[in-house]
Image (cartoon, rainbow, N blue to C red):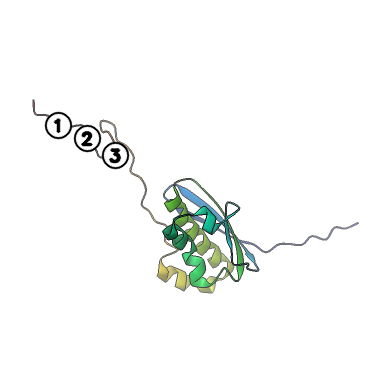
């Protein structure tokens, strides 16, 4: 007996910010929810601003009604994770529909935020904080 293999259409995108990495999967057929680590986005991000940032690229392109968005995010804090989710959704949307690229690019959602924590240097307390200076 031959098995019938059905191929599921999925679009992937990886978003990063600070130490956070978000892996996004878009599946056609929207249900108006974004699942972040198997939890609805509104429950995962408690802060209103973080909810707003994570939602931005989906709201701009009206993706929530067209795609089921599933996100796996790890590392960093919640603020970095929200930025990583926005970046990942934007990248996944481009792999799904390239005509959305100009709108996402203009909004700045495709640019990887390069700001990272500066490393600690030897002889200093932190990255730049030096021990107290005394002349004598």
Q: Is residue 66 left or right of residue 74?
A: right
Residue 127's tag is 3
Which residue is rendered at x = 73% and y = 62% of the image?
7
Give the crowd class for mark 3: few <14, some 14-19, many >=20 residues within 10 Å: few
Q: Quadrant of residue 63?
A: bottom right
Picture coordinates of residue 27 (x, y %)? Answer: 64, 64
Residue placed most toward the observer, 25 or 30:
30
Q: Which residue is mark 1?
A: 133
Q: Residue 61, position in %: x, y? A: 51, 72
Identified at 70% across, 62% down, the residue is 8
Q: Neighbour class for label 1 at 10 Å: few (<14), some, many (≥20)? A: few
Q: Secondary structure at mark 1?
A: loop
Alpha-carbon span between mark 1 and mark 2 = 8 Å
Q: Position of residue 94 (x, y in %)?
A: 53, 67
Structural distance between the alpha carbons of marks 3 and 2:
9 Å
Mark earlier in primary sequence (1, 3): 3
- Considering depth in this image, is 98 or 40 the residue closer to the camera? 40
Name the residue at 54% across, 72% down: 62
Q: Is residue 130 above or below residue 2?
A: above
Residue 87 picture location, percent across and down: 47, 59
Q: Does residue 43 appear to the left or right of 28 in the view shown?
A: left
Name the quadrant containing residue 5: bottom right
Residue contact between numbered discs 1 and 2, judged by CB atoms under 8 Å: yes
Mark number displayed over residue 130: 2
Residue found farthest to the top: 136
């Amino acid at each position: 007996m031959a098995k019938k293999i059905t191929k599921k259409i999925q679009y992937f995108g990886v978003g990063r910010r600070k130490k956070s990495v978000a892996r996004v999967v878009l599946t056609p057929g929207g249900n108006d929810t974004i699942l972040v680590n198997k939890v609805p986005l509104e429950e995962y991000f408690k802060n209103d601003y973080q909810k707003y940032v994570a939602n931005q690229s989906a709201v701009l392109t009206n993706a929530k009604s067209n795609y089921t968005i599933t996100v796996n995010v790890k590392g960093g804090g919640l603020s970095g994770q929200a930025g990583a989710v926005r970046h990942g959704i934007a990248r996944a949307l481009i792999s799904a529909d390239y005509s959305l690229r100009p709108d996402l690019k203009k909004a700045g959602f495709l640019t990887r935020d390069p700001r990272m924590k500066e490393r600690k240097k030897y002889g200093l307390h932190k990255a730049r904080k030096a021990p107290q200076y005394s002349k004598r």
